[in-house]
Image (cartoon, grey):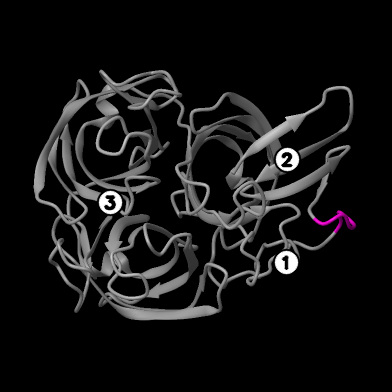
Amino acid sequence: MFTGIVNSGFTSFIMSVLGLVFVCMAGVCRADGGDASGSAAEYGATTPEEGAAYDSNDLAGTWYVHSLASGPGAPWWEHGWWSIEADHSFSGFIREYKGALDPISGRFLFASNGVATFLGARQDPDAVVFPHLHMAANKSVVAGVGAWPTDSPGTAQMIVLARCGLSYQSSDLEGTWYVHSLASGPGAPWWEDGYITVIADGSFRGMVRQYKSDSKEMSGRFQIDPNGVVTIAGLPREPDADGYAVLHLSADKNVIVGVHTWSGGSPGTAEMKIFTRKGESYSTSDLAGRWYRHSIASGPGAPWSEYGPMDIGDDGSFDSPFQQQYNSIPDEWSGRFQIDSNGVVTLAGKSLNPYSNGYGVLHLSADKNVIAGIATWSSGSPGTSELMILTRMATAE
């Protein structure tokens, strides 16, 4: 979680970033009371990958931040905005679930394969506090996971950053979007998937399916401000109110991400929503390349998260020899993805029955750089709901 306590009369402050407690003096941050110096590899950046194409300045700009927690700290979400400088230092404001708007500052470490972490976060796979993020090839979305060491220790957290574009208008939302949502707190386990069509004035209509239930119609009207902040007409604008929702449209106009507090069902439940724009056409080869996967679960299997690289072939087959699970040893995942003409991605051999454990469905964004989706576990803690996001690694042309 991202909270800051700043004393303007001193040069030191205590900051918790993705659950990591930092002590910062004169702008130099460390996590463990030791020397603040160290290599990028030591503090969470990984070694270069052949063919990766990221520049040190790719993080610079204004980003809107959205997070969801699951486990003992739920229900909880977070949203706000950061300004990131060329040296990867950042400052901005963050609002936690039903809380006040607080300032935040810190510094990223950014590797040439697009992996990002926070200065002071040692790369220890056995530590639940390890944060791992990755920037998609479009340079407009960053996604990751981490966990909390304090307050409600062990709480798992997903974070998605959407870059702020130069200008926005309602027509930027026009088109068909696929929605993927996960809830945490009293309403979990719960997910939602489906699609909506948005017209030029922001009005939308579509069909969605909630966790193990029938499809139903979804309609309303989006509103978007000059910064790309998206709200839903008729919902409360007060952050401490049940029903509050706020989202953001990424700079490339292909992903919308945000958070929501339920007012019905199980009031107070926290929810994260990710929308991916539908493209004109799709083929299996659109999936080919190296991706980084980040997942979080809610329900009986929480707290839980997973991350790691994944290589997908032209035929949709994939191999992911290193998937780091929450507070556990790395796992291997392999199989074959299938994609239809709408960009809907499923896993060969898995259930396509949304009422059954083992069901999962994803969607590839129009620019072919982000995949998002939901699943229901069939083993481990059956019935657990999961939200996953895959970000393509940028490669040289």
Q: Is residue 51 left or right of residue 352?
A: right
Q: What is the x, y in percent for residue 213?
A: 14, 52
Q: Is residue 264 left or right of residue 158?
A: left
Q: What is the x, y in percent for residue 58?
A: 58, 46
- Residue indicated by mark 1: 41
In the rendered image, which quarter is residue 195 located in?
top left
Label 3 amino acid? Trp
Q: Earlier in the sequence, mark 3 or mark 1?
A: 1
Q: Nearer the viewer, residue 24 or 50?
A: 24
Residue 176 visible in the shown view: yes
Label 2 amino acid? Met
Q: Residues within 10 Å of mark 2 (few under 14, many from 20)?
A: many
- Residue indicated by mark 3: 191
Q: Is residue 169 above or below residue 301?
A: above
Q: Earlier in the sequence, mark 3 or mark 2?
A: 2
Secondary structure at numbered mark 2: strand
Q: Earlier in the sequence, mark 1 or mark 2?
A: 2
Callout in the foreground (3, 1): 3
- Residue indicated by mark 2: 15
Q: What is the x, y in percent for residue 103?
A: 66, 28
Q: Which residues are magenta?
A: 32-37
Which part of the image, by quadrant, shows the N terminus? Answer: top right
How far is mark 3 from mark 1, CA to CA? Answer: 36 Å
Which part of the image, by quadrant, shows the C terminus? Answer: bottom left
Residue at 30% from the left image edge and 39% from the top image edge: 266
Q: Nearer the viewer, residue 110 or 328?
A: 328
Q: Is residue 257 above or below residue 112?
A: above
Callout in the foreground (1, 2): 2
